Amino acid sequence: MAQVLPAERDLRRVIGDGESIPDGEVDGLDESDFLELYRSLVLLRTYDERSVVYHRQGRIGTYAIFWNHEAMQAGSVHALEDEDWIFPSYRESAIGLLRGMPPATVLSWWRGHPAGWWNPADYNVASICVPIGTHVPHAAGLAWGKKLRGESACAIVYFGDGATSEGSFHEGANFAGVLRAPLVLFCNNNQWAISTPLSAQTAAETLADKAAGYGMPGVRVDGCDVLAVYEATRAAVTRARAGDGPTFIEAVSYRTAPHATADDPRAYIDLERVEEERQRECLGRYAGYLRRLGLLTDELERDVKAEAAQAMRDGIARAEAEPPADPALVFEHALVDPPASFGSDLAELRRILGR
Ligand SMILES: Cc1ncc(C[n+]2csc(CCOP(=O)(O)OP(=O)(O)O)c2C)c(N)n1
Ligand SMILES: [Mg+2]
């Protein structure tokens, strides 16, 4: 029988507020780790902010904004080894950047261009999953496969609060629990599934409570505290590698940006709460922590931001330099036996596009 720990109700936190709440410490991180985490947060933040601008300029398509989700992504990836597999949802579209994927690749994905399709084995980063929760069983299967082969690698799968209502989430979590697969189930609880609030999503007191039903520990962390996320993920990865099976991490935040560039949250969200949450956004909180430790100077901050901005300028230039894709790709790889109408559909598409 699995040893089930009761889901922790209090949010784990490390970063204080510089006033009444003191900073905590994380064992095992040195100065270069702290700065590496900072670079990752800035890279993701810059990617996100520039992408909204590129969308407004018509240079990428509809884009799922992840502003203030960076701590969940950077904190957890830093707790992994490169051999570990990452299964992102659309909210973690740029997480590959933390594994060395060029910004142009991710930008091409959002441009709907084949240059945005990467080989998952090149980075141990699976394809971006847009259907909600369907990648949870994939991640469970890959993790189980690693265990069967006697390899030490594990997997992490990212999904939202809304995904926990999906059958795929249940199937993947149950499968991982029963087989004690080395998997981290990372739930980005931003308290909204487009316009559906968490209160309409579940009657459970916390999402971490669901873990008990799958025979795995459930951990709750402040999703805007990069160090708390790092620590919780590191503990989950250690359990996974030790053969103790999966862990469910509920990283709690509050969505402070629209669901995507096609959404207008003013129709449903509490704007005062959004404003309050923006004051506590994850990058500023971590920068404050580093400054209190004496590790971040104005000059370093300027340099790191300039480097990230340059990477994005180069990325969009490279993505836009790609020759237009062959329209035939829309029809390829869809069906083993394509219907005859595909031929005339393609001819029509070529006529409309003029190529
Ligand atoms: C299977 C499926 N059903 C519905 C949708 C439409 N849809 C896109 S995003 C979304 C909300 C998901 O919310 P959540 O899981 O909380 O993730 P978040 O967007 O907040 O990161 C829905 C329902 C979808 N993509 N896939
Ligand atoms: Mg959500």
Image: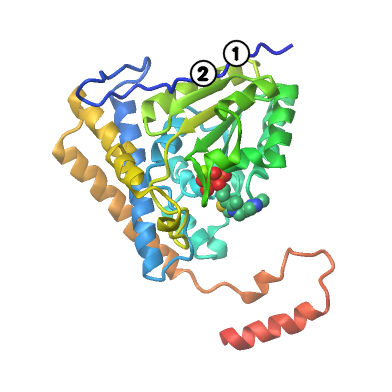
**Furthest residue in direction left, as rendered:** 298
Of residues 316 and 208, the one nearer the viewer is: 208
Horizontal relation, residue 212 to residue 341: left or right: left
Q: Is mark 1 within 8 Å of ligand 1?
A: no
Relative image position of residue 335 (x, y in whole percent): 79, 65
Q: Which amino acid type is marked by label 1?
A: Leu
Q: Is residue 130 visible?
A: no
Q: Is residue 68 visible?
A: yes
Q: Quadrant of residue 208?
A: top right
The answer to whether residue 343 is above or below residue 292 is: below
Relative image position of residue 298 (x, y in whole percent): 14, 39
Relative image position of residue 1 (x, y in whole percent): 74, 11
Of residues 252 and 99, the one nearer the viewer is: 252
Instruction: Please say if the residues under marks 1 and 2 sit with CB atoms less than 8 Å apart.
Output: yes
Numbered badge on residue 77 = none
- Badge 1 crowding class, 10 Å Cα cut-off, few under 14, some 14 to 19, many 20 or more, is few
Where disc 1 sits, the SS reads loop
Horizontal relation, residue 80 to residue 331: left or right: left
Of residues 32 and 199, the one nearer the viewer is: 199
> Residues under labels 1 and 2: Cα distance?
8 Å
Horizontal relation, residue 197 to residue 222: left or right: right
At 44% from the left and 45% from the top, the residue drawn is 97
The answer to whether residue 144 is above or below residue 168 is: above
Q: Which residue is mark 2?
A: 8
Q: Is mark 2 within 8 Å of ligand 2?
A: no
- Badge 2 crowding class, 10 Å Cα cut-off, few under 14, some 14 to 19, many 20 or more, is some
Q: Which amino acid type is marked by label 2?
A: Glu
Query: For the C terminus, which image quadrant?
Result: bottom right
Numbered badge on residue 5 = 1
Where disc 2 sits, the SS reads loop
